Image: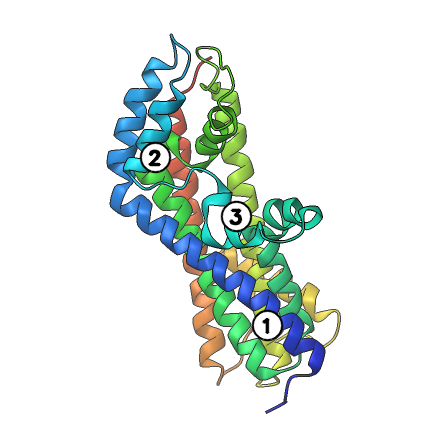
Amino acid sequence: MQIPSSWELIVGSLITLGFGLKLVEVALSTRWVIRHGEVFASELSELKRTWRTSIPDTAAFHALCRLHRRPVQLEEWPVARFLRLAPAVFQRPLVDYVYRFPTLLLLEATFLCLAESEILLAIGIALMLAGLWLEAVHILANRLILGQLDHAYWRTVVVRVWPYTMIQPGELFPSRRRVVRKFVELFGWLLILTLIGYTSIYVALVRTGIGAFEGIRRNVYGIADAFYFSVITLATVGYGDVYPGPEATIARLIVASEVIVGFALIVILLTSFTMTIDEPGDS
């Protein structure tokens, strides 16, 4: 078993720690949605109705969040509060750009494609799988339980209401076109991150040298091979030119998990589209 080099150990530890902490936040957020989301969405919907004809009551909004222990801003999460202790010049980039799920997933995927240590590769593969599945469950739970009050709408409310600015009646009601656009962006990002995540996993499995796949080269072109295999697997096509090795049980299970993710994405797509039609915004 290869011992990690100094750069692998330092960089890998930082990326893995950041990504792991973000996954804990995603898990806690999903748990909150499952336990409190339905009641919170019902009460927020009642409050939302008053925003059509009167200036939004920010005090009532924050009281509702405190009642249900809902973090209002990203900065209210423990890790984000810790990052706020950094020098002012680093605070905004760290919180707004680096410590975000897409950024951390891309960093983890890049590390999986470059690392050599089997230990770090195994840890990275496990975290990547957990991250992809947690994010899919998180988005699905938000859509099924919160409906149009999910994170896309939530971010709009936080940006408009949190600073206690003057908001005109009806300003927090997105049009149908905007709701559809936000959903397409969300679904597109989830699709891209899933493809990139599984591509990095396949590359990492090949780099371990255990004969995980037939048809994926062990050089720079292997990334393109892995991406191609990830696309046809997610689309449940499968041409047979790339496939897990006969003894690669772990690789086969991971491939099967991507097929299941593909079906889950279809469920998210259909569910979200139905909710968009059933609960349209303003014209």
Q: Which residue is mark 3?
A: 190
- Residue 21 to residue 67: above or below: below
Residue furthest right as drawn = 220
Q: Amino acid at mark 3?
A: Leu
Disc 3 element: helix
Residue 262 vs residue 203: left or right?
left
Mark 3–mark 2 CB contact (< 8 Å): no
Q: Amino acid at mark 1?
A: Ser
Residue 224: give x, y in percent of width and height: 69, 63
Q: Quadrant of residue 47?
A: top left
Question: Do residues under tags 1 and 3 come within 8 Å of each other at their CB atoms?
Answer: no
In what element is the residue under mark 1? helix
Q: Position of residue 45 (x, y in %)?
A: 31, 24
Q: Check disc 2 and report its element: helix, strand or loop.
A: helix
Mark nearer the viewer, 1 or 3 = 1
Which mark is drawn over residue 13? 1
Which residue is under mark 2?
Answer: 65
Nearest to N terminus: mark 2 or mark 1 = 1
Residue furthest bottom in the image: 1
x, y percent for residue 246:
49, 83
Q: Nearer the viewer, residue 127 or 54?
A: 54
Viewer-closest of 87 and 215:
87
Q: Residue 187: where, in percent of width, then height?
A: 51, 41
The picture quadrant where one finds residue 275 is top left
